[in-house]
Image: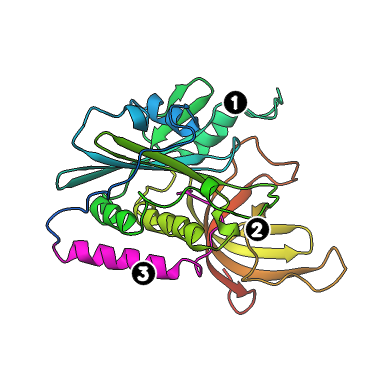
């Protein structure tokens, strides 16, 4: 999404294969999308307006339990929330006869949660990051939301059938399980809702990647299925490719574009493809030629770093020792 969280791919492989088989069935010419199986209406918080519900309302969609405008349709909603600082996502799928339509909604807090009067407002940072990827941004209270835009239409019918095949309507709620108690400093949660005629069910899971049991593996598999839609989400207008020299140090690293002599700061989520110097010398550097996809940090944000620009890396295409390859 993204749904951007920590997930284990090994624990859910059988379930992901089941999703792929379901998708293959759709492609081979199944007559209609799979209906939701019978389920019992239940929820511990049905009727409570959460952040995802507020995002839906801001964009003109009712909460799941009030969505009676299409009484013969069926609906799946999946929201992933990583906290008040990050952008979060809501996925809405609606089956009406042989047609399945989908919507991806992104939402975020409009105010800075740390109450720093001198900080750049949260909504400005989110809008910079999502520029071009979002449609019209709307605000409801202290929350903003938008519909994500696509480069081409995802196969919503395949995604729907995969989710139904994986048991999204009948998975036990996490509160019904006997998970061990764990302490998580910075986690994520998902809320899943299904609606079929006069029945509505909603349940939640927190930090599914911690437990690796059957139910949590199913949650991971749901996320993997929804990734089939996120592959078609339009990149931000501020994203582009960068290539140049990476000077990787023990505590700090710098990036210099090909054809430039000005060093920029660089933020990378992982240095697994490159090694730092094995020394205690803080001035030591190992240099690489790199090609990455990312964007420059929002103007005005430098996190105290002494650089005119900072590259925020989203994906890495190539990392080669400098000298073996260069600009």
Give the labeled residue for mark 1.
111
47 drawn magenta: no
Query: Cα distance, mark 1 to mark 3?
Result: 42 Å
Residue 257, percent across and down? Answer: 59, 58
Q: Residue at x 24, y 43 (%)?
A: 101
- Viewed as shown, does residue 118 lie left or right of 61? right
Q: Is mark 1 on a helix, strand or loop?
A: loop
13 drawn magenta: yes
Q: How many C-alpha atoms fall within 10 Å of the one at disc 1: few (<14), some, or many (≥20)? A: some
Which stretch is magenta?
A: 1-29
Q: Residue at x 35, y 49 (%)?
A: 169
Using the image as rendered, state which of residue 309 and residue 154 is in the foreground. 154
Q: Can residue 307 be seen in this view?
A: yes
Residue 105, percent across and down? Answer: 40, 38
Q: Can residue 79 be seen in this view?
A: no
Disc ID at residue 55: none
Which mark sits nearer the N-terminus, 1 or 3? Answer: 3
Q: Which residue is drawn at 31% across and 59% down?
A: 165
Q: How many C-alpha atoms fall within 10 Å of the one at disc 3: few (<14), some, or many (≥20)? A: few
- Which marked residue is nearer to the observer: mark 3 or mark 2? 3
Residue 211, percent across and down? Answer: 59, 60
Give the labeled residue for mark 2.
255
Query: Cα distance, mark 3 to mark 2?
Result: 40 Å
Q: In which quarter of the image is residue 61?
A: top left
Give the labeled residue for mark 3.
17
Q: In which quarter of the image is residue 198?
A: top left
């Amino acid at each position: 999404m993204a749904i951007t969280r920590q997930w284990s791919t090994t624990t859910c492989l059988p379930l992901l294969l089941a999703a792929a088989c379901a998708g293959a069935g759709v492609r081979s010419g199944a007559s209609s999308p799979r209906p939701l199986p019978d389920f019992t209406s239940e929820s511990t918080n049905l009727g409570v307006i959460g952040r995802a519900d507020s995002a839906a309302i801001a964009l003109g969609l009712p909460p799941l339990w009030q969505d009676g405008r299409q009484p013969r349709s069926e609906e799946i909603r999946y929201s992933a929330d990583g906290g008040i600082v990050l952008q979060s996502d809501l996925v809405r799928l609606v089956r009406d006869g042989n047609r399945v339509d989908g919507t991806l909604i992104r939402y975020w807090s409009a105010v800075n949660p740390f109450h720093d009067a001198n900080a750049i407002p949260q909504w400005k940072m989110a809008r910079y990051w999502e520029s071009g990827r979002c449609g019209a941004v709307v605000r409801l209270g202290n929350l903003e939301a938008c519909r994500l835009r696509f480069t081409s239409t995802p196969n919503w019918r395949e995604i729907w059938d995969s989710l139904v095949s994986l048991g999204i309507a009948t998975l036990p709620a996490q509160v019904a399980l006997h998970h061990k108690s764990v302490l998580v400093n910075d986690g994520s949660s998902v809320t899943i809702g299904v609606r079929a005629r006069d029945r509505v069910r909603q349940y939640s899971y927190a930090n599914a990647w911690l437990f690796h049991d059957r139910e949590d593996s199913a949650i991971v598999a749901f996320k993997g299925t929804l990734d089939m839609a996120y592959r078609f989400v339009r990149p931000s207008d501020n994203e582009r490719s960068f290539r140049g020299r990476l000077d990787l140090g023990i505590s700090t690293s710098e990036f210099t574009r090909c054809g430039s002599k000005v060093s920029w700061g660089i933020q990378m989520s992982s240095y697994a493809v490159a090694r730092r110097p094995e020394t205690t010398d803080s001035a030591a550097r190992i240099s690489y030629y790199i090609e990455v996809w990312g964007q420059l940090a929002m103007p005005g944000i430098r996190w105290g770093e002494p650089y005119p620009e900072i590259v925020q890396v989203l994906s890495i295409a190539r990392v080669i020792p400098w000298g073996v390859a260069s600009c």
